[in-house]
Amino acid sequence: MNFVVCLKQVPDTSEVRIDPATNTLMREGVPSIINPYDAHGLEEAIRLKEKVGGKVTIVSMGPPQAKDALKKAMTYGADRAILLSDRAFGGSDSLATAYILSMALQKIHETEPIDLVFAGKEAIDGDTAQTGPGIAQRLGFPQLTYVIKVRELTETTVTVERKTESGRQIVQAQLPALMTVEKELNDLRYATLPNMMKAATYEPEVWDVTSLPFDTKQMGLKGSPTSVSRIFAPPGRSGGEIMDAMNDPAGVAATVVQKIFQQNIIMVSPLAKGGKR
Amino acid sequence: MTVAVDKTKCIGCGACVVECPVEALDLIDGLAVVDPKKCEDHGKCALVCPTNALAVVKKPSKPSDELNSEAGSKFNLKDPLPESVKDYAQDNNKKTIRSQVTPVAGGDVWSGVWVIIEYTNGKVAPVSWELLGEGRKLADAIGCGLSGVITGYQVENVIPEAFAYGAEKVYVIDHPILKDYRSEPYAEAITGLVKKYQPEIILMGATSMGRDVFPAIATKLQTGLTADCTVLGIDPETKLLQQTRPAFGGNIMATILCRTSRPQMATVRPRVMAMPERVDGRVGELIQEEFTLEEENFRTKILEFISSDARSAFLDKAEIIVAVGLGIAAKRNMVIAEELAEVLGGTIAGTRGAVEAGWLTHDQQVGQSGVTVRPKVYIAIGISGAIQHLVGMETSDFIIAINNDPEAAILKVANYGIVGDLFQVVPALTAEFKKRLQHGVAN
């Protein structure tokens, strides 16, 4: 079977900060990583390939240095990696990004028909969760989002468990299909030595704006309906009362609880019932 | 002479590239780069730059306020847009509307605020009503109507609710195919309504359903979509929806505009907008539409739904949350938090660190990559307060934090910050709460 994994190189967002004084992004020295959710999509693709045979192709869009993420992804056992990189792609929002990626997938699909596409449920820098469904729509594939388990894969269908707020939905989709995955889906493997050696010399293919019959009006800043008009640091919450309970924890606890009841922050009657749950 | 780019300030948002009348700017590797051969020092890029990264180096004979490098910070969305932007927005508007289907008679023609009401398994997601409250403000600001959209099967009970929460019109598609939520038929149904009636703005909760169906609809309509908004505003003149959302793991807030296409679409996080007043007996216009597609048109089927009985599944609806961080040090210490939660009738949650340590499951995680909560009381035990956690809980009504580090960020957002040893403070709190709640005395 033919598996495609959409993968994004992202800054390790826990280390990106905004300087509240100057309102600017402090991003010096922020390391780049494979988007963690995408890594679980890649893992699942490789597991399924090991089970049913086939090929895993990774597709990414980004600046030339995103090759590093693709080379890293190759160490887990993928077969082919394609980087979509061109200045014309820069500044694309999720609608335009999905267009560019879907064009690449369409190209792959024409020569080697795709059975399943994997993507992370969202990228940790943007958190939009829009590119995966956007690709599925453009390719005309059914979309399965928030997948936490692949139950069954047959020649023509895939059955998955999707996570929702109120429970798990078991959905069967006809192939080809696209799924976006949660971290619970699987545990990541470690790269094997042979794969690391293979990846060390592997050079990802780079496709630019001339590689495919792109409509350049649908990409980049001008092809993106949304744009950022302002950025700022999250508003801070004004602090309250600080109490030192190092010496007298019981006394401070009593004071706090008394204040809470005095201000009706917690009331007696409904909670007395709640406590019995 | 040319515009200078301060690379430490540039965030690569591209606003300047769009503004530049002579296409002298480009984004290269995420940074604005000026082509000095093309640049004519209009200074419009400097004016629009959200971070003041651009400055015209040598002042030519232009009004000084336009060329002040600090001018960017004064660009207020409430002000009329600069001429260049207006032209850009208008050109694109025309183009986009032409590319859409012709408006039908009686259609709104890109007017009105719509809220998609999420109705699954016999329940309405409360965020739907919160959005009718928020939609009311937006509709009033631009002088248009507010409508609710209900798609599903046997939804008649939901219709009066939508009116009660403030919808003036309710659009309904009621069909057996829409019984269980599925991306394809829901996207088709809602897209059909949007094409026919052409609303200016469409909102939906940033739930697993909203975040699944909205990207599909936005792609079908070829329009912009902003996910997970926490603040909405609107410019009455341009009717541009100011969609503010956390980005980069919540370290940064970004305000997004959809300048060039309609409708403007956004998903909004549950529990960030206030629940509007429910007025029984309010009525409005009901518009029923047919669903013409057949089951064969769809390639997915729901085999089963396993509802989750874990309390944590409803974390975003919890009134009292007792949350733990790495400060509790070991799984066996969870009992300290559990006892407090038991006494208060609260729900256990925690940080990503606590989840990754295996003390909690992923659906108990509060924060950027978990759930956003807004309980009446949030008790943070041994949580340092990483920004990713804070964005998920800092709108709680009342926050009590216990931490032994007086510098912990959580103490800065807490109403009561208790600096002390949690292993002593928390059991003491539990005992005090127990004493008062069991005796039924408040003071």
Image: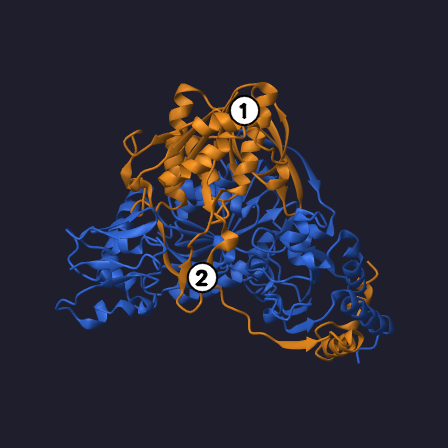
Residue at the (56%, 27%) spot, across then down: A193
Q: For residue B40, which quarter of the picture?
A: bottom left
Residue at the (36%, 65%) spot, across then down: B236
Residue labelled with disc 1: A194
Say whether residue A114 is left or right of residue A269.
left
Residue at the (81%, 63%) spot, across then down: A275
Q: Colour of chain B?
A: blue
As displayed, is residue B90 above or below residue A80? below
> Who is closer to the viewer here, B133 or B7?
B7
Say whether residue B42 is left or right of residue B365.
left
Residue A18, numbered circle: 2
Q: Please name the amino acid that badge 1 sits on.
A: Pro
On the image, the x and y values in percent for residue A122 come to 51, 44
Looking at the colours in the rendered structure, which chain would you say is drawn in orange?
A
Say whether residue B436 is left or right of residue A204.
right
For numbered disc 2, what is the local secondary structure?
strand
Residue B325 can be seen, yes or no: no
> Who is closer to the viewer here, B207 or B98?
B207
Determine crowd level at label 2: few under 14, some 14-19, many 20+ residues with C-alpha closer than 10 A. some
> Who is closer to the viewer here, A60 or B180?
A60
On the image, the x and y values in percent for residue A130 come to 47, 44
| Contact check, label 1 and label 2, Cβ < 8 Å | no
Q: Please name the amino acid that badge 2 sits on.
A: Ile
On the image, the x and y values in percent for residue A137 come to 44, 35
On the image, the x and y values in percent for residue B438 come to 86, 70
Q: For residue B409, which quarter of the picture?
A: bottom right
Q: For residue B68, which quarter of the picture?
A: bottom left
